[in-house]
Amino acid sequence: MKTKKILNCHGSLVLVLLGVFLLASAGGAAAQEQEEKALSFQEIAAEVEKRLPDAEEKLLAGAAAVEQLLKSSKTEAGEMTGKWNEILEQSFASPVMKELAQLRPLLKVTIDRGLHEAMQASRERMTKGDAPVASTSGKSGITLPIARDIHKDAEELLGFAQEIQSVGEAVAWTLKVNRHIESLEFDIGNAPARVGAYVDDMKLMSASLADIRRKANQAMEDYSKTRGSLAELKGEMSRYLTLTMAMKYKTQNAAVSLVNTAKYLEPETGYVIPATELKRMEVLAEYWKDVKNLYPLLRQDIADGVVRWAPHPKAKWANYLESKKEFNKVYAPLLQGNLFQGIPFFEGKKYTELSGVVLDTEMTLRSVLAAIAGEEKNVETRRSALAQDNVLTRKEQEEIRKLEAMYGPEREKNLVKAVHKAAGGYGKVVELERFVENSEMKDGAYERAKEELDTLLKRRHPEQRAADSALQTFYKQLPEAQRRVDAIIADHGKRKKDLGLQPVLKEAKLAKEKTFDTLKPRSEW
């Protein structure tokens, strides 16, 4: 409460000083009377000088507080940028700094007036032949040279306090880097669970798959030699098929999970801080290191405090790079597709190919079972048919994926978005309409704006035409794409039915057929 009262007292005094100065600057007889009572440079200089130590202490405390922020590893905005705003209000833009900012120009004016009066008095004495008189200092002992020094101190202190506020950028950047490091370290800490679980599962499935193949082959050999019970052989093969299909579903789920995890962990889609931001921090660091040369009148301990900021952005960047290096190290096998190195059956396979490994065994078992059940006289013929079906199914799946990419809702959404934003979109039309409506001069700029507006409204701009044409072509070709999808699914279903299998392809996600109207209300562009 005591500090608050002092600040309020100082603030009131500044207002009084300004009021007196403004009255003295007014015209008329009243002004002449006030001019005799106007504040002298000694009085203003004394007020400025009285505030300088407090301002310097505030800046010193601010410099120390900022250093702690730049060293901090906190990730909460309130503890970083929020704290910076508090430091700003309490130090670099504190009430005493604001008072100095108000008093400095007032001191400059009174010094100039004092110099003018001194020169005028000197000329009068020279005219009268009187001896020169030494400059007066008043009760405060402040002469004009001293007042000018005080003004320089205040001016440099205020300039420093204003320019040094750019450190707020560094605080915000530090918060951003801290968050990236935290995210990287979180993923690094979870690496054993993420990566290890996949590796362990595939090792188990590899061993199970080898066991099933060995036992199935042994059962076939035993049956060939002994001509044992066909029912027993069928039951044994059915058990192996059930186990194989369970593994296939696991590998399918693992493939989807691995692809999504790799996509999530890709460096270019996360955890990347542009090098341009580091360049900006390096520029600020150079500025901080040179603060003593830039502000030679600045108190030494304040300048030293600012110089101590300089190494922290580079150190923070080094920490970020170290975390990024460790992240790339622990996730390299997953991201590079080498996660299953040394695991039989799955080594060297793409994640999308994992289920195909198990599918080969499934196809063999189905062929054996088909032969046992009398569905096929020739086991090899049945296996060949299933193999061919597998090849065709993959081709059909690939073709449908391409058609979905070319004619799906996402492609439609992007084309419609391009139509809406072509040549600046609705925002550009509104901008031109306002310009035409508010333009007082019908000059060349007005005519060009009017012509451009007419072109946009009639959708004759090259970007609009290109976007409209692309979307119209999309809708024009969409029915044919849908017919092709229907034909693929129909052929696929018939072939699967003939083989006694359930269809894999049942539908495709294409956009809905519609007519594109380029003359919609412009609010719908």
Image: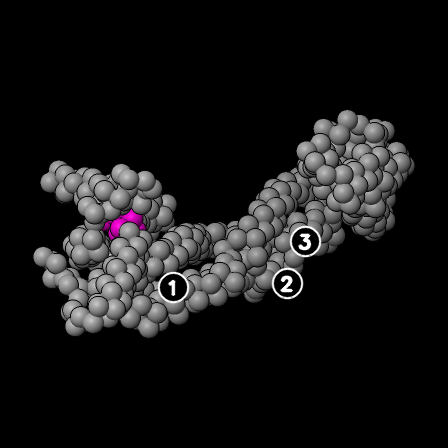
Q: Position of residue 424 (x, y in %)?
A: 72, 42
Q: Looking at the image, can residue 140 be seen?
A: yes
Q: Position of residue 477 (x, y in %)?
A: 88, 38
- Location of mark 2 (residue): 348
Q: Quadrant of the C terminus?
A: top right
**Viewer-side residue, 511 vs 341:** 511
Instruction: Estimate how packed mark 2 is, as few (under 14), some (14 to 19) or many (20 or more) residues with alpha carbons within 10 Å.
Output: some
Q: In which quarter of the view is residue 28 placed?
A: top left
Residue 313 is labelled as 1
Looking at the rendering, the stretch of residues picked out in magenta corresponds to 95-103
Residue at point 28%, 51% (across, down) = 106
Q: Position of residue 95 (x, y in %)?
A: 25, 46
Badge 2 element: loop
What's the amino acid at mark 2? Gly
Q: Earlier in the sequence, mark 3 or mark 1?
A: 1
- Location of mark 3 (residue): 353
What's the amino acid at mark 3? Glu
Evaluate if marks 1 and 2 touch, with contact meaning CB atoms under 8 Å apart.
no
Residue at point 11%, 40% (across, down) = 2
Instruction: Estimate how packed mark 1 is, as few (under 14), some (14 to 19) or many (20 or more) residues with alpha carbons within 10 Å.
Output: many
**Viewer-side residue, 143 vs 224:** 143
